Amino acid sequence: MPTTVQTRNTRQKDAIRAAFLEADRPLSPDEALALAQKEVDALSIATVYRNIGSLVDDNWLTPVDVPGHSTRYEVAGKAHHHHFQCNICGTVHELEGCEMQSRPKLPRGFKYSSHEFFVYGTCSSCTK
């Protein structure tokens, strides 16, 4: 008989979830910690990593691979979109939708499955 793992809801996990919902953008574990500590000040980075892992396993969060940087995480279940990274502060933001309407021209014999790209520049907070 298969067993299902029931993950516990704790104040810490609730604070981490709230951090991702409040930010509404991909967060690093350190960014999630800083936001979640507003609710639970004794929260540690180890607890954040453990809970992020649990939230990924539960399909509540999804990893965002940032070229040349550590993985960020965002709330799962969103429509296809891309990301913007600020060259100054390093924050990652979501870009709505996808402007790539057609598939790229591939070499003969190649088969398209998906695409991903990042946009880089300066965020609104850093241009002030």
Image (cartoon, grey):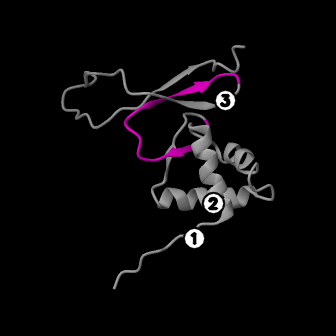
Does residue 69 show up?
Answer: yes
Left or right of 76? Residue 127 is: right
Q: Residue at x 64, y 66 (%)?
A: 10
24 in relation to 32, above or below? above
Check the picture and name the quadrant holding the N terminus.
bottom left
Instruction: Name the spot of residue 123 as percent of width and height, x first.
Output: 63, 20
Q: Is residue 49 magenta?
A: no
- Kindly give the residue lying farthest to the top in the view shown: 128
At mark 2, the secondary structure is helix
Tell me which amino acid carries mark 2. Lys
Does residue 71 show up?
Answer: no
Left or right of 23? Residue 30 is: right
Q: Earlier in the sequence, mark 3 or mark 2?
A: 2
**Residue picked out by circle 1:** 8
Give, as a single range, the part of the protein colored magenta. 69-88
Which residue occupies the foreground of this view, 12 or 3?
12
**Residue picked out by circle 2:** 13
Quadrant in the picture for residue 3: bottom left
Question: How far apart are the alpha carbons under marks 3 and 1?
Answer: 32 Å
Residues at discs 1 and 2 in contact (Cβ within 8 Å) = yes
Q: Earlier in the sequence, mark 1 or mark 2?
A: 1
**Residue picked out by circle 3:** 90
